[in-house]
Amino acid sequence: MLSDTARKLLMIMRHCSVHHGYMPTLEVFERKSGRTSEKIRAGLQELTENNYILWEFGKSPESAVVVEGWERTEDRPTSVSWGLDGGHIDY
């Protein structure tokens, strides 16, 4: 299962590449995701390790290539239960 940051970055990358014909820059990621550059790089690394994108750490995000543009269904939890306070989630 992808982290929230990695999932959001993947959605941004897919949208930009399919609808606009370019791969987003670090500045575009910061603006659209609300994440810091460190968290963006960590999210890109997570996507690379899970084979969602091809990207070399240290290179610009524009050099990335999307391999799989959405999260795999087998990685998602099948059920979610909320705690009494509405804030605790057990998978």
Image (tube, helix red, strand yellow):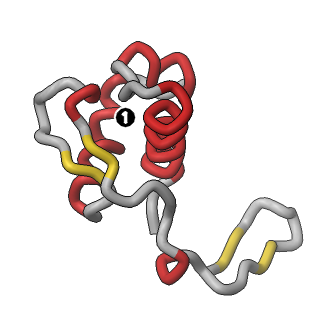
Residue bearing the label numbered 1? 39
User: In terms of image quadrants, where is residue 13?
Assistant: top left
Q: Position of residue 48 (x, y in %)?
A: 24, 53
Picture quarter containing residue 65? top left
Nearer-the-camera pick, 91 or 71? 71
From the viewer's perspective, is residue 54 above or below residue 50?
above
Where residue 34 appears, as percent x and y from the top left, is: 55, 24
Looking at the image, residue 41 sits to the left or right of residue 91; the answer is left
Q: Residue at x 38, y 60 (%)?
A: 68
In this view, the residue in front, 14 or 85, is: 14
Label 1 packing within 10 angstroms: few (<14), some (14-19), many (20+): some
**The C terminus lies in quadrant:** bottom right
* Rendered view: 48 above or below 37: below
Q: Is residue 75 above or below residue 25?
A: below
Residue drawn at point x = 27 percent, y = 26 percent: 62
Name the residue: 53% across, 17% down.
Answer: 31
Residue 25 at x, y = what percent? 35, 19
**Image-based side of 32 in relation to 50, left or right:** right
Q: Amino acid at mark 1?
A: Lys
Q: Position of residue 11 (x, y in %)?
A: 53, 44
Name the residue at 77% across, 79% down: 81
- Say left or right for 88 vs 62: right
Label 1: which secondary element: helix
